[in-house]
Amino acid sequence: MQGPHLRPLDLTDDATAAAVHRVGRAAYAVEAQLIGFDGIPALGESLERMRARRLRWLGAVAEGGAVAGFLAWEETEDGVSIDRLCVDPARFRRGIGSLLVRHALTELFPDRPVGVTTGADNTPAVTLYERHGFTRGADFSPVPGLRMASFTLRRAGAPAPGGSPHP
């Protein structure tokens, strides 16, 4: 059996959007349990609202066309912000998250600073970002009961926020 292949996802396609929405809700339900907070905004996001987001989507697609996971991001003035990285819980611990992150960092935005946040108690996500060279910044609490961890990845020669080269 072959692993998933990566391809851009087109959320204007109804079946693709429904699959991404299903995988995202399932993944965020697991994160909610891990961090002890069920108010994660994406967990309650409607299909229509998800499709309306100005994000770019990369999917890990399994044999038969099922979405095994995805990564969504947006370009910012300072680099790239990963908005979400989700893997179908039925496919956890198979390297799909790492495959998506590695491809994005090396092929999609290899020379840009990258930022991402996750629940501070989401140990699998924290470990994944640290393993891929992200540096953990200050934790923050956007709402009571939720502690988030922020991560950045800067590359040698890549501009830092504000446009000056990062030492």
Image (cartoon, grey):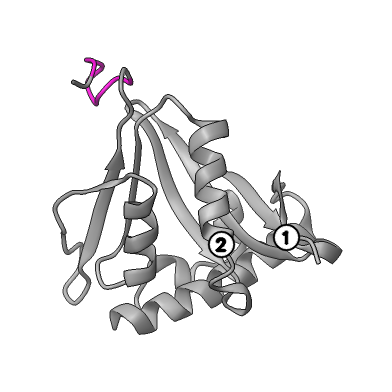
Q: Are marks 1 and 2 in contact (CB under 8 Å)?
A: yes
Query: Mark 1 belongs to which amino acid?
Result: Gly
Q: Quadrant of the N terminus?
A: bottom right
Query: Is 33 one of the magenta-colored residues?
Result: no
Task: Give the residue displayed 61% in from the left and 70% down from the top.
Answer: 23
Query: To which residue does mark 1 refer?
Result: 3
Task: Give the residue displayed 33% in from the left and 44% down from the top.
Answer: 133
Q: Residue furthest front?
A: 1
Residue 121 visible at all: yes
Indicate the secondary structure of the residue bearing disc 1.
loop
> Residue 37 at x, y = what percent?
30, 80
Q: Which residues are magenta?
A: 158-165
66 horizontally vs 91: left or right? right
- What predominant SS class does the magenta segment belong to? loop
> In terms of image quadrants, where is residue 79?
top left
Relative to the observer, which residue lies in front, 73 or 128?
Answer: 128
> Residue 164 at x, y = what percent?
22, 15
